[in-house]
Amino acid sequence: MVRRRSLAFVGVAALVPLVASAIPAQAASGSLAVTTLGRHGAKVSTTVTVVAVPSGQTYRVASGKRISLPSGRYLAMTDIWEHGSEGLGTDTIGAQVVQVSGSTSVTLDARKGKAVKVSLDTPADVTDAPRISAQVCAATVSNMPSAFSTGGWNYQGSLYAIPNSSKLLQFGYLAQWSGNDSYVAVKNTTGIPAAPGGSFKRSGLATVHFSVRSGTEMGSQVHTALQAEPKTDDCTSDLMDDVRDDNAPYSATVHMTPGTWQPRDDISGSDGEGVSAGFPKLRTLKAGQSFTQFFGRAAWSPMHYLPMVGDKSVAFIPYALIGDPDVGVYNADVTKETVALTKGGKTVKKQTLTNWETSDAEFSAGIHSVGWYDLTVDAHRYRPGITFPAGMLSSRATLDWHFKADPNKAMVAPVFMTRFLPTGLNSHNQAAANSTTTVDVSAGRGSQGPDVKFTAVTAKSVRVWSSADGGKTWKAATVKHSGSTWQASVHNPASGAVALRSEVTDAAGDRSVETVYRAYAIG
């Protein structure tokens, strides 16, 4: 096992200014040196995080090295990690409140550390000690204490914390027990307790089921995780439970303390590097509640931007054109697309774009007269440097929007995007040969921002077709309307893959045609 020296934090932590050397002499009127001792009393080299109170100005300095600082109050925090003869060694997390005036020295002594002890009425299949991720945070310098923190992880029996009752500190941990299912507990305290840890019961936990399908992602290896996201940020924020890192498909079940959690997945491509990460909506669960988080279900499709009319032009942002609807619009895969605007069969503008390594790709074409326009988009997944998995699903999506536009009136075009959700597929997103698949179809219009008029539009009719030959020929599906969605009955071929196409029209004659190629497979 590779030893990670510290926790990996995300989000606000990246905004903290870190200073490796002393600040200019004219601004400093004191200095600080922090000595760190191991559990046997010998000096141990660590990196110490020093946080000014209340400004939050943050410095990192090697233990034993003196750093010039303005006089004032500081928090000195570190993880004292020591090699062991076997396993991961030991971690001792500690912090002190320091008043810097003149030449100041303090010592963080791991011998004062108390073992972090957690317990759970675990089932028989849990046989190993829990793994614990812990950190100490500056509690009062901002409303984001987890941004000013230091910590580490280890297994119970090898993780310690030095008690400190100061209200300027918080201590948070995440404990994970692994068996057939995983069990996760988080706890936050003001100060570092004299007896850090806690006792938990399975009857008081909530449950998340992870269902990871294969076939739709740009890579086959999927790392799933849960991050603690309390409604009020504290020292448990962003502590992460690694659920599973494996080739899809797979399923996993996590039982965790009630609260708000962020499911996530990270995909590795053919080169072993990360190619995408998905952050579905936060889930807040009470004891006994459960939900299933899907990743990689068929079919992936356009999810957000619609054509916009304004400033005598039609504009379109080619973003989130192929993405996992279960994950969300802001984690869609990169595409390369050809966008064209026509009027009466004549091309106004045609352009090839991509959002690979850029965030400002946009199509804009000037218009000069009122009339019916067609905006077409042909998007393919695009990721230079990797090889897509053989037979990857949802590899291409197209849109054909037909709408009336006035160059002098700003609006979001009255058109739709469709979500296809084939039901009854196996974990490889496959339907049985020569079977019938029910596809749930919904027509949506996501908000496009406050600067353009966004009117309610009602779908008058929805039609669906399927293709078993890559779009050469199409067969109409039987469609039934049920509430706010439609169900299409698609007759499957003996082998290959199925493409899906929808046509949504409104009472004014606006039309939206969407196609997802290789929406699901036959197997």
Image (cartoon, helix red, strand yellow):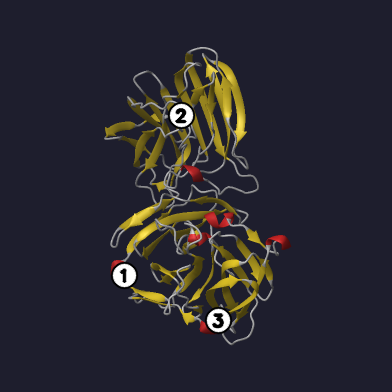
Q: Is residue 2 visible?
A: no
Per the image, the residue denoted by label 1 is: 202
CA separation in Å, label 2 and label 3: 72 Å
In the rendered structure, are the residues bearing label 2 and label 3 in contact, judged by CB atoms less than 8 Å apart?
no
Residue 434 is situated, as x and y percent measured from the top left of the image, at 37, 42
Residue at (42, 42) in percent of width and height: 494
- Check the image and report above or below for 359 versus 161: above
Per the image, the residue denoted by label 3 is: 110
- Check the image and report above or below for 342 versus 198: above
Tell me the amino acid under the disc marked 3. Ala
In the rendered structure, are the residues bearing label 1 and label 2 in contact, judged by CB atoms less than 8 Å apart?
no
Q: In this view, which residue lies farthest toward the bottom?
A: 40
Tell me the amino acid under the disc marked 2. Thr
Which-is-in-front pick, marks 1 and 3? 3
| Left or right relative to 199: residue 34 | right
Judge by depth and name the residue closer to the eye, 184 or 402: 184
Residue 504 is situated, as x and y percent measured from the top left of the image, at 38, 27
Residue at (40, 52) in percent of width and height: 282
Mark 2 burial class by Cα count in 10 Å: few <14, some 14-19, many 20+? few
Q: In this view, which residue lies farthest toward the right?
A: 25
Tell me the amino acid under the disc marked 1. Arg
- Check the image and report above or below for 269 versus 116: above
